[in-house]
Image: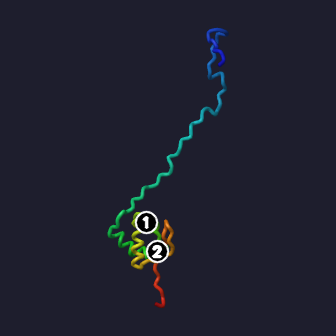
Amino acid sequence: MPPKKDAGKGSGKQTSKKSDKPTSGGGKAKKKKWSKGKVRDKLNNLVLFDKATYDKLYKEVPSYKLITPSVVSERLKIRGSLARFALKELLNKGLIKQVDKHHSQIIYTRATKEEGQ
């Protein structure tokens, strides 16, 4: 550390710190504030069927070209687990047919009437 300068001794004039250094435009930069992130609206999907949604399931879902649990969940505003059980029920009744089964997603399509039988 350099030795301290005595303000009382010497030339007798005091220098201020502001006049010693030329003012620079930069100064201290403000710290970057982290964004809170994107806020998604909470889905308020049904856990159990009500009468209107159950009727809509039997009326509209068999007419979809592509039927997956995620499509049914989004359109009918029901939980994914409820959509999976509903599609199993429609499959057992023969209203839809299964196209492909994967461990996480099952794809169905509408049941078409076979000609000649």
Q: Residue at x 42, y 78 (%)?
A: 95
Residue 73's disc number: 1
Q: How many marks?
A: 2
In which quadrant will I find the N terminus? Answer: top right
Q: Residues within 10 Å of mark 2 (few under 14, many from 20)?
A: some
SS under mark 1: helix
Position of 91 relative to 77 (above/below): below
Position of 8 relative to 29 (above/below): above
Q: Which residue is mark 2?
A: 64
Which of the two labelled residues, at mark 2 and mark 1, occupies the earlier sequence position?
2
Position of residue 81 measured from the top left corner of the image (x, y, whole percent)? 41, 64
Position of residue 107 measured from the top left corner of the image (x, y, whole percent)? 49, 72
Position of residue 19 measured from the top left corner of the image (x, y, whole percent)? 64, 22
Identify residue type, mark 1.
Answer: Ser
Q: Residue furthest front?
A: 103
Q: Residue at x 62, y 19 (%)?
A: 16
**Drawn side of residue 47 relative to residue 71, left or right:** left
